[in-house]
Amino acid sequence: MALYEQEVLNAVALRGTVSVRELATLLSVSEQTVRRVVKPLVERGVVEKVHGAVVGRSRPGEEPFLARMTVHQRAKVAIAAEVASMVHDGDAVALDTGSTTGFVAQALRQHRGLTVVTNSTFIATTLATIPGNRVHMAGVELRNHDGASFDSAAFAVVRSMNVRVAILSASALDPSRGLMVQELAEAEMSAAMGGVAEQRIFAVDSSKFGRSALVALPPMVAGDVLVTDRAPDADVRRAVGAGDIVIVR
């Protein structure tokens, strides 16, 4: 039941309100089973049950992650669908923690037989219950605001893997510095995942264009792909370097 509970929480975090029928389809269980899963969550005050649906309740420490999930949501969902189309059944995939990669994980639920390594509990639980998937959660100690791990165990797991594609996020796309993130650990994890992948795909919505952050990611090289929702200006395009750009509408 614990995995089902987490999937309910993931769905509610993404959408705010989810019907019992939709949750039954998502979990591949009966509506009666959904009600049994939801009951202890309601008792703990994590969600609210309304007629035929489940509604999320924010808790201390959750707001930063949930806020990112709702900002520019339409663009992120479109980007996620495009990224998921680049992944094949049976692929080995690394995903870092981020709001857009969270949507990618949701889109990847339609795939089968994936081997997944991630340092995000959100992504791990989103993909762990899909038939044939093998999900490796990298790390032991979790950050309280997004459930991601950046401890030594996380890096050890990631560096032991060999994946076809790393799906990565960024906080900014600076015209002079390229892709950037807010924390050194995030940059190091991005580099670690990219280092064990045949290809890097960056899922970045256009609100990040022209912005700067604290730490630069390794430059994009030939074979890398930036998937976004709007064509960047010339100066931002130059910052992408040799990487390709895919624009979704």
Image (cartoon, helix red, strand yellow):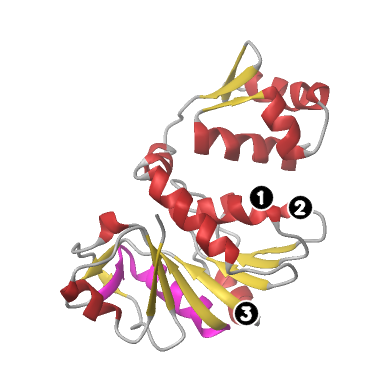
* Closer to viewer: mark 2 or mark 1: 2
Residue beneath disc 3: 164
- Position of the N terminus, as image quadrant, is top right
Q: Which residue is pictured at 35% across the width and 42% down the height?
A: 71
Residue beneath disc 2: 130
Question: Of helix, strand and loop, which one carries label 3?
Answer: strand
Is residue 142 visible to the viewer in this orientation of the structure?
no
- Position of the C terminus, as image quadrant, is bottom left
Looking at the image, tell me whether mark 2 or mark 1 is earlier in sequence order: 1
In magenta, the rendered stretch is: 178-197
Q: Which residue is pictured at 29% across the width and 58% down the height?
A: 206
Q: Residues within 10 Å of mark 2 (few under 14, many from 20)?
A: many
Identify the main secondary structure in magenta. helix
Q: Which residue is pictured at 22% across the width and 80% down the height?
A: 238
Image location of residue 227, percent across then percent down:
42, 66
Question: Of helix, strand and loop, which one carries label 1?
Answer: helix
Image location of residue 212, percent across then percent down:
20, 65
Image location of residue 214, percent across then percent down:
24, 67
In-front residue for pair 6/83: 83
Q: Is residue 56 left or right of residue 210?
A: right
| Spatial CA span between label 2 and label 1 | 10 Å
> What numbered label is drawn on residue 125?
1
Q: Is residue 181 left or right of residue 96?
A: left
Question: Of helix, strand and loop, which one carries label 2?
Answer: loop
| Spatial CA span between label 2 and label 3 | 19 Å
Q: Residue furthest top?
A: 51
**Quadrant position of residue 174:** bottom left
Residue type beneath disc 1: Thr
Q: Is residue 179 magenta?
A: yes
Looking at the image, tell me whether mark 3 or mark 1 is earlier in sequence order: 1
Q: Which residue is pictured at 52% across the width and 67% down the height?
A: 151
**Quadrant position of residue 38:** top right
